[in-house]
Amino acid sequence: MKLSYLKPLGFLAILPFLLGFAPPEENGTYVGASAGRGQFISASGCSRPRLHEFSDFQAGAYHKRDIDAEGSMQAGLGADAGRYSETSIECAAGCGSSEAHRDQEETALILSPYLTFDWKWIGLTGGLHYLDIESIRDSALLQDPQDRRYSTTRTDFLPRGRIRLGYAQKVYASVEVLNGRPFGSGGGLYEAGVGGRVKKTDLYAGLRLGSPVMGSSPGSGAGSVAAAVARTLGPVRIRLDGGFNYYDHDYERTNSQGEVTEQFGVEEPQYRFSAGVDWRLPF
């Protein structure tokens, strides 16, 4: 990933200190940004294994206010820009190894409104994602990837949700569906885990299943172990999130007579990571 991609995060991280914004978790209006990237392998039936790579950036805002003595509400909106690619992994000459062939590239713009209700022992989040995706496929990539005559567009709506049980500032368990920040690199399709708070640091660990990227097949991708940490440092809150596993599988192709015609192995790390920052506006 190019270092220039992270420059907006560096600027956003120091801006709250320069302006003296109030600490997070108070009532008020918050703005934030996050960025990340990742990759995974998908394969099903007789199809060739495919490498999915993605990077995305999100900017967003939400408003928090108390609704009773122990409860609060957040209303927020996130806007994502992401780039995704899908590459088939095929038998190389002589087999025993593999080579890649780019099949598809996608550029996505995503709007994600949501509502969160938090009480001491339970929290609920509900919302949706609106996706506007432009795709360019195989033969077009070999001709001219910049020629938009070869591209197609589609839109989609996907749900978003989270349930928390337990005291958020002590120990809790949660289940999530497409609730990552950003959309692609910030989480899985499904996720379950446990978390808690140690002083001003929030810790979380869980399991993720599937990937939200590539709108035509949001369930692709293997499960992974995930971890996240969020730290309040004076007027700013910084979030780090990641998940990892390793793909190692041997493939064989046979003809109609049952003879092996291809044999090769695929070894690739599967990961996603993201970083973000939030702060409260002074009004």
Image (cartoon, helix red, strand yellow):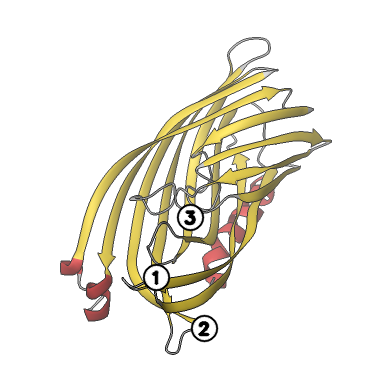
Q: CA distance from mark 2 to mark 3?
A: 38 Å
Identify the image quadrant of the C terminus.
top right
The residue closer to the viewer here, 61 or 185, is 185
Would residue 122 appear left or right of 186 to someone viewing this image? right
Q: Are marks 3 and 1 in contact (CB under 8 Å)?
A: no
Q: Which residue corresponds to mark 3?
A: 57
Q: Which mark is residue 96?
A: 2
Q: Based on the displayed image, in which of its 4 quarters is residue 25 positioned?
A: top right
Would residue 37 appear left or right of 140 to someone viewing this image? right
Mark 2 Cα-neighbour bin, 10 Å: few <14, some 14–19, many ≥20: some
The disc labelled 2 sits on which kind of residue? Gly
Query: Where's residue 60, x and y in %?
Result: 48, 42
Foreground label between 3 and 1: 1
Q: Are marks 1 and 2 in contact (CB under 8 Å)?
A: no
Q: Residue at x 56, y 64 (%)?
A: 7
- Answer above or below: position of 213 versus 166: below
Q: Residue at x 44, y 60 (%)?
A: 43
The mark that comes first in sequence, 2 or 3, is 3
Q: Which residue corresponds to mark 1?
A: 88
Foreground label between 1 and 2: 2
Query: Where's residue 220, x and y in %?
Result: 45, 52
Identify the image quadrant of the N terminus.
bottom right
Residue 169 visible to the viewer: no
- Answer above or below: position of 130 versus 152: above
Q: Residue at x 61, y 22 (%)?
A: 123
Foreground label between 2 and 3: 2
Which element carries disc 3, helix, strand or loop? strand
**Number of marks in the rendered image:** 3
The mark that comes first in sequence, 3 or 1, is 3
Query: Where's residue 152, x and y in %?
Result: 21, 59
The disc labelled 1 sits on which kind of residue? Ser
* Residue situated furthest left in the rendering: 149
